[in-house]
């Protein structure tokens, strides 16, 4: 099996954005954003029509926010969001007084959805804090938050994460495979199953058992029946013949990420 690479690297575009943000903040007063959103994961049973999303204002001034839902797919190894009417937010625009919270209902319009494919359907709920128009002049820069919350319509028979009691069975990786692109430092993961795959705590384990932590947090999702990829840099400490290991979904135990047949 080919040696897997190491730490996720930032793209030049992201580095430029971070640098620009730091320079901007260095010359301005900053007002902390005050929008909080819960839950951070939304799951619908196949016949469920509504879920609740709570927006809280932890600040000392009123705030406005916009809630939108977009269809979430992955094409050519990249995230894709597109407008949808499968799920809608009501109300879509809210004003929240200081110290108060607002209920937003996520409504599933069943009559508009395509015939069931037997696979989980994926969406992103985007919650944007809107700029104030009544702030005092020269008050400085306000950091406006955007939340991007994963939302799923589960396949029949699946148990929502929040309702699981006790240890869950380990994620089924029988239809999952990973490849490392030749020369481009790209890890590509294909998920042929009918449910999402959530990848966390990525590590490379050398043949002698020594570990190299690649990402100790969330790497990302591979949606049902789709493929996702991430840029990686091969560490000098990685030795041929090792394995890539991670915690999948909400398991408490790591597993090896299966290589594609050509890499075995």
Image (cartoon, grey):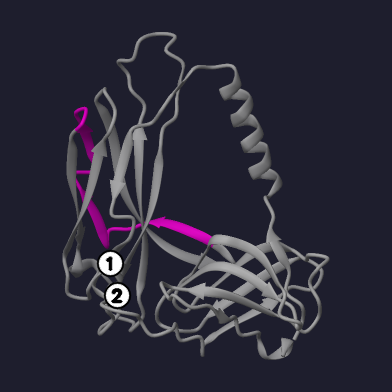
Q: Residue 2 vs residue 253: left or right?
A: right
**Which x, y percent locates residue 123?**
36, 62
Q: What residue lies at 27% left-to-right and 31% top-to-bottom?
A: 64
Q: Residue 263 has which mark? A: none
Marks 2,1: beta carbons within 8 A: yes
Give the labeled residue for mark 2.
154
Q: Earlier in the sequence, mark 2 or mark 1?
A: 1
Q: Residue at x 23, y 67 (%)?
A: 112
Question: In the rendered image, which quarter is residue 48 located in?
Answer: bottom left
Q: Quadrant of the N terminus?
A: bottom right
Q: Which secondary structure is most common in the magenta stretch?
A: strand
**Quadrant of residue 185 within the rendered picture:** bottom right
Q: Residue at x 61, y 76 (%)?
A: 245
- Quadrant containing the C terminus is bottom right
The vertical placement of 3 against 79, above or below, is below
- Residue 77 part of the magenta segment: no
| Real-space CA distance between mark 2 and mark 1, rounded to the nearest whole angstrom | 7 Å
Question: Residue at point 22% right, 73% down?
Answer: 45
Q: Is residue 251 above or below residue 184?
A: below
Instruction: Using the image, determine if residue 263 lies above or below residue 24.
Output: below
* Residue 87 locus on image (x, y percent): 26, 59
Q: Which residues are magenta?
A: 79-99
Which of these two is toward me, 258 or 67?
A: 258
- Residue 82 in magenta stretch: yes
What residue is pinned by disc 1?
43
Q: Is residue 60 above or below residue 127?
A: above
Secondary structure found at label 2 = loop
> Is residue 76 in view?
no
């Amino acid at each position: 099996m080919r040696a897997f690479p190491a730490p996720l690297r930032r793209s030049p575009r992201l580095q430029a954005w971070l640098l620009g943000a730091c320079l901007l903040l260095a010359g301005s007063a900053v007002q902390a954003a005050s929008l909080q959103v819960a839950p951070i994961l939304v799951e619908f049973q196949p016949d469920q029509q509504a879920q609740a999303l709570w927006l809280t204002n932890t600040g000392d001034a009123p705030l406005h926010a916009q809630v939108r839902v977009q269809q979430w797919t992955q094409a050519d190894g990249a995230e894709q969001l597109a407008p949808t009417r499968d799920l809608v937010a009501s109300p879509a625009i809210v004003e929240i007084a200081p110290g108060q919270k607002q209920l937003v209902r996520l409504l599933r319009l069943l009559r508009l959805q395509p015939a069931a494919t037997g696979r989980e359907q994926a969406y992103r709920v985007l919650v944007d804090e809107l700029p104030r128009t009544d702030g005092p002049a020269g008050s400085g820069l306000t950091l406006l938050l955007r939340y991007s919350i994963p939302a799923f319509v589960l396949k029949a028979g699946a148990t929502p994460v929040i309702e699981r009691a006790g240890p869950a069975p380990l994620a089924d990786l029988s239809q999952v495979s990973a490849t490392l692109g030749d020369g481009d430092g790209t890890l590509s993961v294909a998920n042929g199953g009918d449910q999402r795959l959530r990848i966390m705590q990525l590590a490379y384990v050398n043949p002698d058992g020594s570990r190299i932590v690649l990402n100790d947090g969330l790497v990302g999702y591979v949606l049902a029946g789709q493929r996702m990829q991430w840029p990686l840099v091969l560490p000098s400490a990685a030795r041929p013949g090792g394995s890539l290991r991670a915690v999948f979904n909400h398991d408490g135990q790591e597993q090896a990420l299966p290589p594609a047949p050509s890499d075995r």
